[in-house]
Image (cartoon, grey):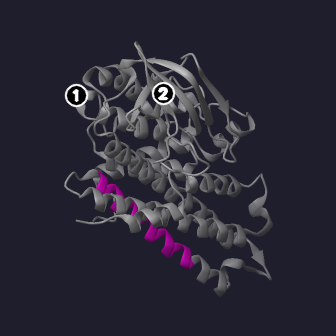
Amino acid sequence: MSLIYNEDQQQLLDSAQDFLAARSPVAAQRALRDADAAVGFDPQVWQGMVELGWSAVAFAEDQGGLDFGFAGFAPIFEQIGRHLSASPLLSSVVLCGSLIEQLGSDSQKQGLLPGLIAGEQRWALALEEADRHQPDLCDTRAIRTDSGYRLSGSKSWVIDGLEADGWLVIARLEDGQRGVFAVPAGTAGMTLQRRQMIDARNMAQLLLEDAAVDASALLASDQFEAALELTLDRGRACLAAELLGCCEAVFAMTLEYLRTRVQFDAPIGSFQALQHRAARLYVQLELMRSSVMAAFEALDRNQVDPAQRRQLVSLAKWKANEAAQLISNEAIQMHGGIGVTDEYDLGLFLKRIRMAQSQLGHSAFHVSRYAGVRLS
């Protein structure tokens, strides 16, 4: 396993760093929050990401992608975290794109993927039904009709669900198996409710009351469970990379404050107790990076056993959650009162970190998942 980016990944990182610093700095996220923008991101910035090829990174060339490999998302999401940039890259491309790519028929792929990759269409995954991440829970029902299906149920946490062009809805079929339905915007019987989040991102609750869809809306369901698990693992790795970037930014802010804040006629960074605390945070950052790199390597190599992949991804998300908790808490402590003022950017990072920690599995979830994996 390599602990550094290869040449191509480094180029992606440099490009993402330059673009986000110019087009989507932390101040832009603050402006989106203050404007109370329901969509949660700047559409022009998102189009810029698409033009840079980010939405095409992991897709095959015959699907309109760059065939770069999934590991290409690691430096991109790291920089997204460092700049606190909001976009539908995770929800529309990583999650929905992965499901469509794995489960869609040729006609479904041709109808959905080109628009998604080009940024012309934005889809959101409607999976969660509980207060916390429970991917196996599914009470939403799909009843067969003469013309298709009727969907009924509630999805509580739909990332980037507001103003989407469609939703991939996970529902349980009459035979007890689960399937995923491509539900376009404007479908009768469907209601969206905005959920206000502490990080000011786009989050919705989706209500379905006999929402009628054509039979062609059902993506192939034979390998659904394996496809969903791989899709969620991809999303978890991307969130772990985003948390890594957030923590790198928070750590850099903290070091700068320790160098410039003077107390008792000396920079507080000269105090040995604070130096030791900062050193421990650096160690946690490096451990987080190694676990994230291992997860992306496992996701990018087809020969890795699925059980090993599940363990490495859960390890990465758990380590990212735990390290982010420590680093953000210590940053607030070492900054003192200024660290919790709204005018200071540290608070914005703290709120995003807390949300990313809970999405696609908190620490206890991934500890349990790691322990439950049986390696062959």
- Quick check: can you spot residue 290? no
Residue 308 picture location, percent across and down: 29, 62
User: Mark 1 — residue?
Assistant: 62
Task: Determine if the magenta segment contains residue 288.
Answer: yes
Q: Is residue 287 left or right of residue 164?
A: left
How many neighbours does mark 2 have within 10 angstroms: few (below 14), some (14-19), or many (20 or more)?
many
315 versus 121 height, above or below: below
User: The magenta stretch spans which residues?
Assistant: 279-299
Place of residue 132 in the rendered image (x, y in percent of width and height, measured from the top left): 58, 52
- Find residue 68 and report its horizontal and vertical position in percent: 28, 42
Decide whether the magenta segment is chiefly helix, strand or loop. helix
Q: In the picture, residue 269 is in which quadrant? A: bottom right
Farthest residue, direction left: 303
Pointer 2 residue: 122
Inspect this view and state whether residue 170 appears.
yes
Say which element carries label 1: helix
Task: Report the front residue among 290 and 337.
Answer: 290
Q: Is residue 148 above or below residue 359?
A: above
> What is the CA distance from the residue labelled 1 to the residue labelled 2?
20 Å
- What kind of element bears circle 2? loop
Left or right for 312, reference 375: right
